[in-house]
Image (cartoon, rainbow, N blue to C red):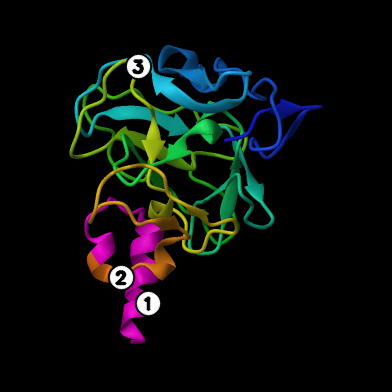
Amino acid sequence: MAPYLEGELIDPSTQKTEPVYPLSIEGLDKLFEYRSHEGGLSNGVVSQVDLPAGAHFCYITQHKPAAKPDWSTVQAGKHTHIDLQSGLVYTNHSCRPSLEFQMFSPDANGKYPQTLPYELPEGQPAPVPGKHGIAGEVRVAHDRAIKKGEDLTFFYPSTEWKSVKPFDCLCNAGEGICVKNAAGSSYLSKEQLSRYFLADHIKELLKERDAQQ
């Protein structure tokens, strides 16, 4: 999503420069590589591995709390957001995503868990929590495998209730799948959202919204 300029994240639509986060962070260099447009604009990541549907991909351990949502933050709870501080920040949107971001909400003190909030599946590596704990787990989409060289994407409304910078979707997922405008799940119907994986906090917000209708 955002390349590097003088140590800060910037809007990638305005600059042509190198990514801010080396893929060695969280060991992501074993999982994906940056993809760039001609001219050097880093605008996404592609898989370096073949994995089956639903497989563990990585944990979200390098992050920090965000005071307010921005175009580069990810919503981690009903009212909380994080700045990703790894190559995951370059994961683009698709209405037919290859990845799913299951977020772990912080506790009442704003602290993220130090261990998984569920039993570790057999054969899956245990996370090593970062300074601010474990904010989530990234998994391969439940309905499709990923192949080496494939774009790594996730469905932004699966974590975002109201996006601060909506955009017209160009994912070409097809009629009935593409939401046309990625503005957050609050703008989509229950029927529309039934087609997609949703993070737990989005499910909770949807229940609250629908109960008021």
Q: Would you call the spot at circle 3 few (<14 residues within 10 Å), some (14-19), or many (20 or more)? A: some
Q: Is residue 64 visible?
A: yes
Q: Is residue 61 visible?
A: no
- Furthest-right residue in view? 6
Q: Main secondary structure of the magenta part?
A: helix
**Magenta segment range?**
192-213
* Lower sequence index among marks 1 and 3: 3
The residue where tag 2 is placed is: 189
CA gap between label 2 and label 3 equals 33 Å
Residue type of the residue flagged with mark 1:
Glu
- At numbered mark 1, what does the secondary structure look like: helix, strand or loop? helix
Q: Which mark is residue 149?
A: 3
CA gap between label 2 and label 1 equals 13 Å
Q: Is residue 206 left or right of residue 135?
A: left
* Lower sequence index among marks 2 and 1: 2
The residue where tag 1 is placed is: 208
Quadrant assignment, res 46: top left
CA gap between label 1 and label 3 equals 40 Å
Residue type of the residue flagged with mark 3:
Gly
Q: Is residue 206 in the magenta section?
A: yes
Q: Position of residue 107 (x, y in %)?
A: 52, 57
